[in-house]
Amino acid sequence: MRVISRRKTTIFFLIVGVASISAAVVLNISWIIRNWRDAVLLFSGVIFFLLIITGLVLNTTFLVREIRRNEQHDSFINAVTHELKTPIASIRLYLETLQRRELEPSQRKQFYGLMLEDTDRLLGTVEQVLKAGQVRMARAKTHPEEFDFRELVGQCMDLARTRHHLAPSAVYWHQISSNGAQDGSPVKVHGDPEDLRTAVANILDNAIKYSGGNVDVSVQLDTLPYENRIALRVSDRGIGIPSHELKRIFKRFYRVRGRALSGAKGTGLGLFIVKSIARAHGGRVFAESGGSVPGTTVTFELPRLSS
C-alpha cells in the first residue's frame, strides 16, 4: 500500500509540474505577443520566462527524486529488518527448544551449528550497514599495503563455498586466461586488504545469490598490460540483469525489480560498497549481462604494481 501511495504521489507532483510549466509557457508567450514591439519589455519577459521554466523544472525534478529516494530508503529498511528479524527468530526458536526438551548430543550439536550460521548472517548484515557508512566518508581510514590479490581472491572463494555450503565445482577459477594471471604467479596490488576482501566477497555473494538453484560461478583474473591494471571477472549463469539496470545496481539501496528477483535476499548495499572501494583504490567496477551467454559478469579493475 505504501508503494502504491508513493507512486500516486509521484504521478501527482509530475502532473502538477507539467501543468505549471504549460501554464507558464502559455502566459509568457501571450505576454510576448502583446509586447513584441517593445524590445526592453520583450527581452525582460524572455529572461523572466526562462527563469520560471528553469525553476519549475528543477523543483519538479527534485520532488520526484526525493520521493523515489524515500521509496528506496523504505525498501532498504524493510530488507534490513527482515535480514535481522529472521535469524533472531530462528536462534530464539532453537534456544527455546534446547531449554524445554532434552535432546540427543548429535541433535544439540546440529542446533548449535545452525545458530552459529544465523549469527554469521546477523553479523554479515550489520557489517554491510557499517561498511556502507564508512565508505561514504570522504576520508575513511585505510591501511594500504602491498599484497598478492590473487591469493586474496582465492581465500574469498573458499569462504564463499563454506558460507553457502557449495561444492568446489560451484565456484571455480576460469581455466582460460590469455594473460597468464591464473598460472599461480602473484598479482601484486597496493591497497587496503580488508576493504578489497569485502569488495570481492560481495561480488561473489551477489553472483551466488542470483544464480538460483544451480550455482555456477567462474572467476577469472587477467592482467591488462596496456593499462597497467588487473581485471577480476566474476560470471554467473543466473537470471541476468536487464540492460537498463546495469548501472543502477551500484547505487545505494538500489535493488533490481522483477518477479524473478523478488526472492533474493539482501540490503541493496553490496554493490554500492564494491563501487566505493573500487573508486577509493583508483579502480572501477561494471556489470555486463545479456547476449548469447546467460547470467551476469561483474568486472572489478584495479591498478597493478609493476614487478
Image (tube, helix red, strand yellow):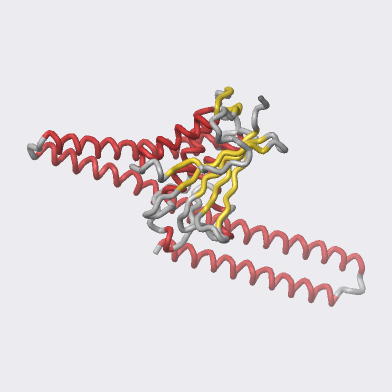
- Quarter residue 244 falls in: bottom right
User: Which residue is depicted at the point 76% across and 60% down?
Assistant: 51
**Where is 188 relative to 19, above or below?**
above
Decide if residue 54 is on the left or right side of residue 44.
left
Q: Nearer the viewer, residue 186 or 78?
A: 186
In depth, the one of 94 and 150 nearer the eye is 150
- The answer to whether 180 is drawn above or below residue 248 in the figure is above
Horizontal side of residue 136 vs 105, given as left or right: right
Quarter in which the C terminus is drawn:
top right
Q: Position of residue 37 (x, y in %)?
A: 92, 74
**Residue 101 spot, x, y in % from top left:** 8, 39
Would residue 164 be visible to someone looking at this image?
yes
Look at 21% across and 35% down and name the residue there: 112
Residue 185 pos. (x, y %): 57, 28
Q: How many marks?
A: 0
- Residue at the (48%, 35%) spot, across then down: 198
Residue reaching furthest left? 102
Name the image quarter holding residue 109: top left
Q: Nearer the viewer, residue 76 or 213?
A: 213
Q: Quadrant of the N terminus?
A: bottom left
Q: Is residue 125 visible?
A: no
Q: Is residue 99 left or right of residue 16?
A: left
User: Is 261 displayed left or right of 110 in the figure?
Assistant: right
Instruction: Report the front residue among 180 and 152.
Output: 180
